[in-house]
Image: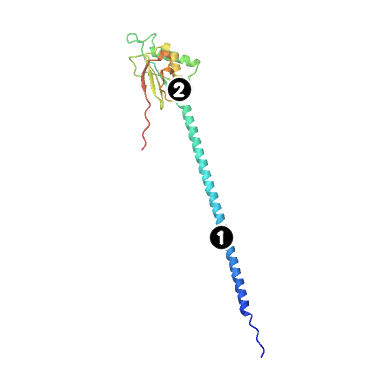
C-alpha cells in the first residue's frame, strides 16, 4: 500500500493565525500611537493656554501697578497746601484799624504783592479769611493740607510777609508738614501757636 503524506492544513492555519495576530498587533500599536499623539497635542495645547493665561495675568498685574504709581504721583503733584491769612486781625484792641484797614488786611496785601512778583509753588493756594481763632494774638496765618500737620503762626505783622511766603514754600515741600525750627525763618521761630497732627487713617478690620 502507498504511504499517505501528512496534511498541510494545520501549518497553513497556524500561519494565518500568526498573520492575523501580527495585523491586530500592528493595528493596536497604530491606535496606541495615535492616542499618544493626541494626548501630547492636548497636553501641549493646555500648557500653551496656561502660559497665555499666566502671561495675561502678569501683564494685567503690571498695568495695574503702573496705573497705581501714576495715580499716586498725580495725587502728590496736585495735593493742595492752603495758606490762610486772617484779614480781620486788629492792630490792637484800642486801635483796631489804620486808614480803615485792619492789620491782617495789611499783611494779606503785603503777601499778595510778593507773590505777584514771585509766584508761590503750584501746589500752594493763598486764601484770606476772617478768623483763625487767634484773635488775642494778631496777626495769624495758618497752613493746612491733607495728611499733614496743621500749623498756625501768631503775633505776626505785615513786616513778616516775606517770612510767611518762605514758610509756605517749606510747608509745600515737606512730606508731613511738621516743620522743624531749622526750616522756619528766624523771625517766625517761637511764633507757632498751633501744631495739630493729621487725622489718623481709620483702622481696618
**Mark 2 → mark 1, Cα distance in angstroms:** 71 Å
Where is 200 relative to 1, above or below?
Answer: above
Tell me the quarter of the image containing the N terminus.
bottom right
Which numbered disc, 2 or 1, marks the residue closer to the eye?
1
Question: Alpha-carbon neighbours of circle 2 within 10 Å: few (<14), some, or many (≥20)?
Answer: many
Image quadrant in which you'd find residue 157: top left
Tell me the quarter of the image containing the C terminus.
top left
Image quadrant in which you'd find residue 186: top left
The residue to which callout 1 is attached is: 35
| Spot occupied by residue 96 in the image (x, y as percentages of width and height) | 35, 10
**Residue plotted at (60% across, 69% down):** 22
Question: What is the basis of the colouring in this image?
Answer: rainbow
Please give the label number shown on residue 172.
Answer: 2
Where is 172 relative to 204, above or below?
Answer: above
123 left or right, relative to 23: left
Q: Nearer the viewer, residue 122 or 76?
A: 76
- The earlier-in-sequence mark between 2 and 1 is 1
Amino acid at each position: 500500500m502507498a504511504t499517505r503524506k501528512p496534511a498541510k492544513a494545520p501549518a497553513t492555519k497556524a500561519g494565518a493565525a500568526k498573520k492575523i495576530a501580527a495585523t491586530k498587533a500592528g493595528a493596536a500599536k497604530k491606535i496606541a500611537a495615535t492616542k499618544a499623539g493626541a494626548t501630547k497635542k492636548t497636553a501641549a495645547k493646555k500648557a500653551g493656554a496656561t502660559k497665555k493665561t499666566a502671561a495675561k495675568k502678569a501683564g494685567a498685574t503690571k498695568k495695574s501697578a503702573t496705573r497705581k504709581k501714576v495715580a499716586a504721583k498725580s495725587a502728590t503733584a496736585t495735593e493742595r497746601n492752603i495758606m490762610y491769612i486772617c484779614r480781620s486781625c486788629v492792630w490792637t484792641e484800642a486801635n483796631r484799624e489804620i486808614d480803615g484797614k485792619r492789620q491782617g488786611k495789611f499783611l494779606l496785601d503785603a503777601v499778595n504783592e510778593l507773590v505777584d512778583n514771585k509766584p508761590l509753588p503750584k501746589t500752594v493756594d493763598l486764601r484770606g479769611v476772617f478768623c483763625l481763632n487767634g484773635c488775642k494774638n494778631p496777626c495769624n496765618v495758618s497752613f493746612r493740607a491733607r495728611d499733614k500737620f496743621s500749623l498756625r503762626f501768631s503775633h505776626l505783622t505785615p513786616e513778616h510777609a516775606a517770612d510767611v511766603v518762605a514758610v509756605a514754600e517749606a510747608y509745600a515741600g515737606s512730606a508731613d508738614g511738621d516743620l522743624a525750627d531749622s526750616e522756619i525763618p528766624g523771625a517766625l521761630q517761637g511764633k507757632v501757636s498751633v501744631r495739630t497732627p493729621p487725622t489718623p487713617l481709620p483702622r481696618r478690620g
